[in-house]
Amino acid sequence: MSVRNVVLLVVVAVLAGCSTTYFTYKGETFASRDEALAAIQGDIDLVLNGTEARPAPVANRARVVIPNKEAILERGLRVGGSSEHRDYVSNALQKQIQLIPAVIKKRNIFKRVDVEETNSPDILEPTPGVITVYRYLSVDGKSGSWYYASQSTPRAPLRWDMGESDFVNRYRHFLDSIEALAVSEAGK
């Protein structure tokens, strides 16, 4: 093999290495999308297993409105990269967003929880007789947050305890916020 061919093979090998897609989650890099999504699922399972049900619901009905994958791709991503990478990030976000109605149900805050997926995750107006928990994503993709809305609480932002190092406790704080708002309404 000539020197020129060896140099060409080295250049091709280096360039091929540069095009490898890696997937990250919580600062850890994974060689495959499936490994990264498995790590995310592990945290989701941890949160679900760590969520304890209340002995009795504090409110009657909730509607949880979450963005579908199309909305996440259009409004929720500010990442570039390959379509494979964008798809991974949107799937990761979708899994984490879908965890919210699951833990709300498991916590037993409401007697009934209806979940809706939407491609228009906009600010929602309160619905009479229903507490709405929803994920808003701005059209420009620069902002988004979780909100609680009802007739007596038109729009209250829901927050995470980002100072909490325990992943399950971050979700517990979020659920405590929903529960406290629901309890305050039950007393009105």
Image (spheres, rainbow, N blue to C red):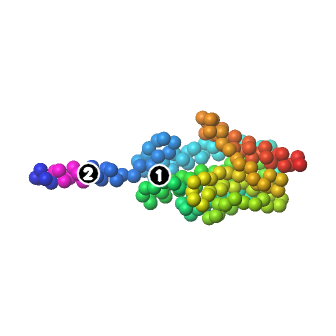
Q: Is residue 42 magenta?
A: no
Mark positioned earlier in the residue sequence (1 or 2): 2
Neighbour tally class for label 2: few under 14, some 14-19, many 20 plus, Cα within 10 Å: few
Residue reaching furthest left?
Answer: 2
On the rendered structure, is 90 left or right of 101? left
On the rendered structure, is 180 left or right of 93? right
Please state which of the two labelled residues, at mark 1 or mark 2, is closer to the viewer: 2
Q: How many callouts does the rendering have?
A: 2
User: In the structure shown, which secondary structural element does the residue marked by tag 2 occupy?
Assistant: helix
Q: Residue at x 43, y 46 (%)?
A: 30
Residue under circle 2?
13
Residue 26 image position (x, y, % from top left) = 51, 42
Residue 51 image position (x, y, % from top left) = 68, 43
In this orientation, which residue lies closer to the viewer: 38 or 78?
Answer: 78
Residue under circle 1?
34
Q: Are marks 1 and 2 in contact (CB under 8 Å)?
A: no
| Residue type, mark 2 in image | Ala
Q: Residue at x 65, y 60 (%)?
A: 121
Image vertical order of residue 135 relative to residue 170, above or below: below
Q: Residue at x 72, y 60 (%)?
A: 124
- Between the C-alphas of marks 1 and 2, the distance is 24 Å
Task: Identify the magenta region.
Answer: 6-12
Res. 21 visible in picture: yes
Res. 53 visible in picture: no
